[in-house]
Amino acid sequence: MVDAVSSRRRAGIVTRRNRRGLWYVMPALAMTLVFFTTPLLGTMWTSLHDWPLYGDSTFIGMDNYRTAWNDPAFWSTLLFTVQFMAAVTLIGVIVSFGLALIVRTPRRGVGLLRTAYFLPVTVGYAAAGFLWFYLLDGRVGVVNDVLLRLGIVDAPVQWLADVDTSFWAIVAMSVWKSAGFGMVIFLIGMQAIPNELYEAFRVDGANGRQTVRHLTIPLLRNNFALVMVLNVALNMLAFDQFYAMTGGGPNGETVTAVYNVFLNAFEYQKLGYGSALAMMLLVVLALVSFAQLAIFRRRT
Amino acid sequence: MTTTPTTTEPRSVAVSHDDGPARRPGRGSHRLLWYAGAIALAAVFVFPLYWAFVSSVKTEEQAAASPPTWFPEQFSTENYARMGEIGATGIYGALLNSAIATGLAIVFTVVLSTLAGYGFSRFRFPGRGIVFAFILLTFMIPFQSILIPLYQLLTELQLTNSMLGLALVYATWQLPFAVFVMRNSFDELPHTLDEAAMLDGCGTLRALVRVLLPSAVPGILTVVLFTFLFSWNELLAALVMVSDAERFTVPVQLSLVLSNQFGTVEWGALQAGVVLTVLPCMAIFFLLQRHYQAGATAGSVKE
């Protein structure tokens, strides 16, 4: 039907037109190359040097990595960050799922409740940090006021002056700030479960708790995975709320991994050492991601 | 549902007959309990924001009162005025800086991701898969880990202390997500749309702008929303890339209130700053909230 000449010509036009696709993706590719790939290679390169903020750099091979490996501060910030990440992720996943269960059924006022739970997500971590810094203050803070009135504490607590209380205070703040996001992801999954399944469970005499345990949770496995992965990545890289609320104190005990990179590079002006710390953080994150991927693969 | 009405209908009727009346009294109290719990929880989530607002319109003295007062005894704007005086530019100068950086970042992200999304969706050029994977892969690498060379690079380009520099950085970090969203939204549009336009003699760019773009608006708004929330609130890069106090963005400016020369915190002013930072985020969220869910699912549909 189609003669060979015109079809070949059309093929030629199509190929030529397809090539044009490269022009459309070029700006984004160039941007990524200049402002992402180059600095990434730069991190590797800088990490092999003694590189002060001002002045000349000297190549020192793997020395920065050796120093970091033997630096107790590196390990303590990493451990602190992992603990923080684990606490926020565990509590955050449970709270997000609970919120989604509460606002799952369309009832009067449910839209308003969803908005209320979600509202803190729109607030930035820095602003949220400065807000909670005020709420938690030992003298003027409203949290102490409430706890005193309820008789839960007898004297005002200096929440952010102690490493344990500031840890849990910032965990609470971070869950408050991010739980609504997880809720949305769970809600999307719950809305995809057909009503017939719920009805089948009801017919079989399952109560609410059994339905959640044997129907909702297994069907939302992917949503759990996603909320967890996002929480892990987000909180392993936590910085803003610590910068705003504790400034890394008391005695540098609430310095997170990213905070440690920031301090070494831009406060102590050791760009090389900071880069080595950044590379190690990158590797840790990659390992965590692969571990999660492997766990979820095996489950499915 | 509509295809097999005979099998589903009797069963659902049976359910409501057997279960309905017996459960109803229990359900009523259950519902009351549900409302009580849900509303109490909502109060916990909203309270900090209420508190920031209420404190910001107290007098400075009252905002720093111990124990705190739960309602402002007199309405005052002095904290907002005070916030305008702190630092080199005051909070209002910082708001302007943030608006410029955020606005530029949105423009860059939208333009680049629209072009790239169109390219990936409509053209089978050689290396397409690799380039796409290459851009998306940066999503896996935390931007916090490339900050040091990025600082050196921007210094080299004389783009430190510059909202343009910050915007370029923010746009780059938003690109993988944005390209992914835009590729998907072009994929959802029928090919007949732009093919017809091209048969009418439109070039590929004209087909994009005239024919496809209007239908891709939901995707673009998703990109706008996420780029706004990210850029407006970003702290770490803004701290590193900007040292000139005239160019501080809002999150950096807020930290100045903590480190004033007297070593005391001006609580009311700080909360006024928080409110001014948060309000634009809430406004744009309420404006575009329909598009939030699309962004939230973008990660999960990939599988």
Image (tube, coloured by chain):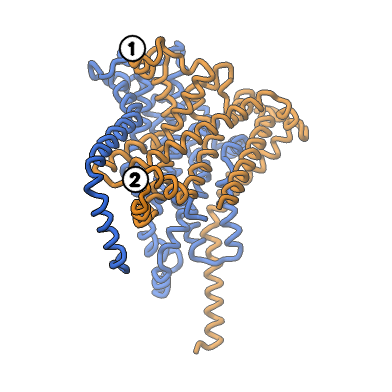
Q: Position of residue B120 (x, y in %)?
A: 51, 61
Residue pictured at 40% horizontal, 42% vertical: A183
Q: Is residue A8 above or below residue A168?
A: below
Residue pictured at 58% horizontal, 51% vertical: A297
A219 lies left or right of A151: right
Tell me the colour chain B is drawn in: blue
Residue B164 vs residue B179, the one in the foreground: B179
Q: Between marks 2 and 1, how big is the CA–CA gap?
A: 39 Å
- Identify the disc placed on residue A104: 2
Q: Position of residue A56 (x, y in %)?
A: 72, 30
Residue pictured at 45% horizontal, 39% vertical: B231
Q: Name the secondary structure under disc 2.
A: loop
Residue A80 vs residue A35, the one in the foreground: A80
The residue type indicated by label 1 comes to: Pro
Quarter placement of the N terminus of chain B: bottom left
Q: Residues within 10 Å of mark 1 (few under 14, many from 20)?
A: some
The chain that appears orange in the image is A
Mark 2 vs mark 1: in front: 2
